[in-house]
Structure formats: structure tokens, C-alpha cells
Image (spheres, grey):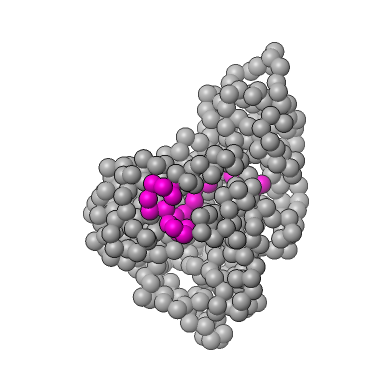
């Protein structure tokens, strides 16, 4: 397959590319000017930005086990519509990704779907029970690019110590869900004035920060690579900054919803404002934005967590935690952070391409000659409104419904194949 993309605004901050130009793709790779050769597809991109394909380090596709919420197929469709070419799926499926069979099942299903790259993340412990290490070596051989018990924190520090030590042999990170579950037990929203006012049991920020501190010290002791999922509080950021200043191998992610929303959204009783960690205070939100801008927080991750309508329509205390995010992540951050000047486009792109790819050692996230042709074409001037009727995800539990945004994904190209273009999914060869 030969593709010519003409007159695009090429934008790759990793390689200091910011210019109008052409991209030629052949056999899944970027090649030299082939204008003299015929192309199978020619794309006029004169009004579009071409960026490296977006990489999500943290997503939930629910299959196997909860296909009523999401499948690998529907999750892949949501991903490419949102401009993501690579998605790492968390292991809290049923059964969990704690053995080679489940890991290979996910890889095979992703190949069959043939829309985006899917990388499974294996469990740290068997059954995500926090007691006995999973067969990490076998999971790595089956395609797992990291290990996490996401949804559960590894509460036993000795178990996490051993996981960090073992991961050194594989040169992959441990992705920790930082939550002291004894401190957060039965909590519904952030602990504070609003939780008291509403009569909900709160989840204090110390439940997160205490594990962040413990795990950073364990990473220092073992030399292992630690990645902290969905950091949400100023307290955690202060500790994270300490760890980075000490040269400890720690990275962290933040979600769009924690960057943009606060606990005040919960006053609506909309269960699409219920997630874990919970939405926190305005000062926490400000600290998160500043930490992303200053590089203390490394990446944006969606924590795409679909739930069917019947689950989210329960009363607030009974509804599950989690919101979807693949189809809105780029646009909502571009609109609410980049356009007002709180974050540069360069910083946003790096946090969603090169940086997550580096953490997991994925060979994507940049534009270069001979490089893998995973690209996203975006019209930064186009406007749209978040409407649940238009989601490709099987679930519609978004906190951004009704928001008017700028930035529409025009095309998504994965391994030199156009999988999404002009609002339509493309079959190979079309």
C-alpha cells in the first residue's frame, strides 16, 4: 500500500518538526519522495495537522468478561475515531490477564479487528489478589508490555518489592494503582466539604499520596521502573517531584477528567462524575495542570472505563466508578488547555505520543524517515459537540457530554493503512 499525504502541517515536537510538507508511506513505513510513483491513496491534507499517532497507556476494553460494556472491536473503533493508533489495555478483565492464554486471546482479537495496535498489560499478581506474583516472564513473552493490578493497589509492600525487582529482568515498568484501600474503603467521592454536605463517605487524598510515597521509596530501593496511574492530588505531585529530583525511576500519568473537572461536578449527582480516584479540589486541578506543563507528570492517559447505561443509571452510591475518554481526550484538552494558553500544543502532543511510547518502549510516537507510519490527521479548527449518540464505544458514560470542542480527527493511519477517514471506518484496500 502506497499513500501520499500532501501539504499537511507536519507537527512532531520530538524531532522538532513544524512545517508544511508531504509524507509518503510504503509498506507501513515513511519513505523518500515518491512523487514519480503512483500512489494507491492520495490525501489532500492542506487544512490538517499531521501528528504522530496518539498512544494511550491506560485503557479498559472489558473483553473478556464484560462485553456488554465494551469489546476489543468497539474499543478499537473508539480509539481510532479519537486519533489513537496504540492502546494499552488493563488486565482487570474476567478472567484477568494473569496468564498467557488471556494475553494471546487479546492479541489475536486485536489482529482480527485490524484497526489499532493493542498492547495487553499483564497482572502483577495472580487474580489481582495482591498475594502471589503472576508468571511475569511468560506474560511478557505473550506480548504484555507492563504489569499492573489496576483497580486494585498492591497493598503488601513486600509483594510490590518483588515485582519491581523481577520487572528489572524484563526491563518493563510496574504500573501501580495508588490507593490505600483501607483509607478509601466504601468512599464515593473526594473527602471534604462537599462529601460532608452530600452525606457521602469520602476518599481522602492521603489514600493516594501515602501509596505514592511508599512506592517511590520501593522504586528507589529496588531500582525498578515505577509508573503511577491516574494521579489526582497536589499531595501526590509534591511527592512525585521529590522522587524525580532524586533520580528515582518513576513516571506518572493524569487523565483529562482530573485535569479539567473538580469535585463540584458531583453536585449534579450525575454518575458520569463518579470515578476513582475521585474528582478533587480546584487547587488539586491547578496543581495537576501545572505538573503536566512542567513535566512532573509525564503523560496523559484516558483511563477509558466503559460501563453500560443500566449500571450508570443506578443511584450515585451504587453506580460503578469510571468514565470513557478515548473519543474526547485530545479535543477536550486542546480546547480547554491549549487554546486558553495553559498548555502548549507541543506539550500536549508529547504527553500523548512520544512520552507514553518511551515509557513502554513502543516503536511509535514520532515522524521520521524509515519510521513506522502511525499518524493522526486533525483539523484543529473544526468544531463538534460531544453527543453520546455518536460514540463508537458501546458505552456512553462520559463527563463531557454536551461540551462544544475544537479539533476533529480527520484520518487515523496505522502501520501505513488508513483505518479511519472523514468520519468513516475504512477496510484495507479501500
Left or right for 152, reference 132: right
Residue drawn where x is 43% and y is 72% of the image: 205
Residue drawn where x is 70% and y is 41% of the image: 425
Q: Report the front residue among 252 and 105.
A: 105
Q: Is residue 231 above or below residue 318?
A: above
Give the percent coordinates (x, y) of residue 218.
Answer: 27, 57
Give the percent coordinates (x, y) of residue 67.
Answer: 57, 58
Give the percent coordinates (x, y) of residue 283.
Answer: 51, 69
> Would you say residue 386 is visible in this rendering?
yes
Q: Quadrant of residue 131?
A: bottom left
Q: Which residues are magenta?
A: 81-103
Q: Quadrant of the C terminus?
A: top right
Residue drawn where x is 37% and y is 60% of the image: 127
> Would you say residue 5 is visible in this rendering?
no
In this view, which residue lies farthest toward the top? 36
Q: Quadrant of the N terminus?
A: top right
Q: Is residue 8 above or below residue 308?
A: above
Left or right for 382, reference 338: right
Asked whether 88 falls inside the magenta stretch, the response is yes
Q: Report the front residue among 105 and 256.
A: 105
Total numbered badges shown on the rendered structure = 0
Give the percent coordinates (x, y) of residue 374.
Answer: 58, 35
Residue drawn where x is 45% and y is 78% of the image: 186
Q: Quadrant of residue 216?
A: bottom left
Asked whether 58 falls inside the magenta stretch, the response is no
Q: Report the front residue among 43 and 60.
A: 60
Amino acid at each position: 500500500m502506497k499513500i501520499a499525504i500532501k501539504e499537511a502541517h507536519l507537527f512532531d515536537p520530538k524531532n522538532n518538526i513544524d512545517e508544511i510538507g508531504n509524507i509518503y508511506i510504503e509498506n507501513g513505513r515513511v519513505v523518500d519522495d515518491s512523487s514519480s510513483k503512483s500512489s494507491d491513496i492520495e490525501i489532500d491534507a492542506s487544512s490538517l495537522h499531521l501528528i504522530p499517532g496518539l498512544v494511550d497507556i491506560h485503557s479498559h476494553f472489558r473483553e473478556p468478561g464484560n462485553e456488554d460494556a465494551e469489546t476489543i472491536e468497539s474499543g478499537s473503533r473508539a480509539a481510532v475515531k479519537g486519533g489513537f493508533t496504540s492502546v494499552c489495555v488493563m488486565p482487570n478483565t474476567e478472567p484477568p490477564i494473569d496468564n498467557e492464554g488471556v494475553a494471546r486471546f487479546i492479541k489475536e482479537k486485536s489482529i482480527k479487528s485490524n484497526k489499532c495496535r493493542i498492547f495487553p498489560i499483564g497482572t502483577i499478581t495472580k487474580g489481582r489478589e495482591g498475594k502471589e506474583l503472576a508468571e511475569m516472564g511468560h506474560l511478557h513473552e505473550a506480548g504484555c508490555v507492563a504489569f499492573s493490578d489496576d483497580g486494585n493497589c498492591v497493598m503488601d509492600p513486600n509483594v510490590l518489592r518483588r515485582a519491581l525487582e523481577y520487572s528489572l529482568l524484563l526491563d518493563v515498568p510496574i504500573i501501580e494503582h495508588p490507593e490505600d484501600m483501607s483509607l478509601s474503603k466504601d468512599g464515593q467521592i473526594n473527602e471534604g466539604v462537599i462529601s460532608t454536605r452530600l452525606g457521602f463517605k469520602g476518599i481522602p487524598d492521603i489514600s493516594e499520596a501515602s501509596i505514592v510515597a511508599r512506592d517511590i521509596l520501593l522504586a528507589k530501593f529496588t531500582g525498578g521502573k515505577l509508573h503511577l496511574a491516574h494521579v489526582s492530588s497536589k499531595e501526590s505531585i509534591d511527592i512525585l517531584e521529590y522522587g524525580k529530583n532524586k533520580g528515582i525511576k518513576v513516571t506518572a500519568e493524569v487523565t483529562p477528567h482530573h485535569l479539567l473537572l473538580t469535585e463540584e461536578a458531583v453536585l449534579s449527582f450525575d454518575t458520569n462524575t463518579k470515578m476513582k480516584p475521585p474528582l478533587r479540589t480546584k487547587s488539586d486541578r491547578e496543581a495537576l495542570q501545572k505538573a503536566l506543563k512542567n513535566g512532573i507528570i509525564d503523560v496523559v492517559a484516558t483511563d477509558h472505563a466503559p460501563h453500560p447505561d443500566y449500571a450508570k443509571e443506578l443511584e450515585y452510591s451504587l453506580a460503578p466508578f469510571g468514565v470513557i475518554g478515548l473519543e474526547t481526550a485530545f479535543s477536550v484538552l486542546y480546547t480547554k488547555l491549549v487554546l486558553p494558553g495553559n498548555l502548549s500544543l507541543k506539550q500536549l502532543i508529547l504527553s500523548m505520543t512520544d512520552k507514553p511510547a518511551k515509557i513502554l518502549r513502543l516503536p511509535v510516537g514520532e515522524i521520521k524517515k524509515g519510521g513506522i507510519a502511525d499518524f493522526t490527521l486533525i483539523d484543529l479548527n473544526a468544531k463538534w459537540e460531544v453527543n453520546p449518540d455518536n460514540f463508537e464505544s458501546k458505552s456512553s458514560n462520559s463527563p463531557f457530554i454536551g461540551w462544544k470542542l475544537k479539533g476533529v480527527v480527520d484520518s487515523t493511519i496505522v502501520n501505513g493503512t488508513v483505518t479511519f477517514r472523514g468520519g468513516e471506518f475504512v477496510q484495507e484496500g479501500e
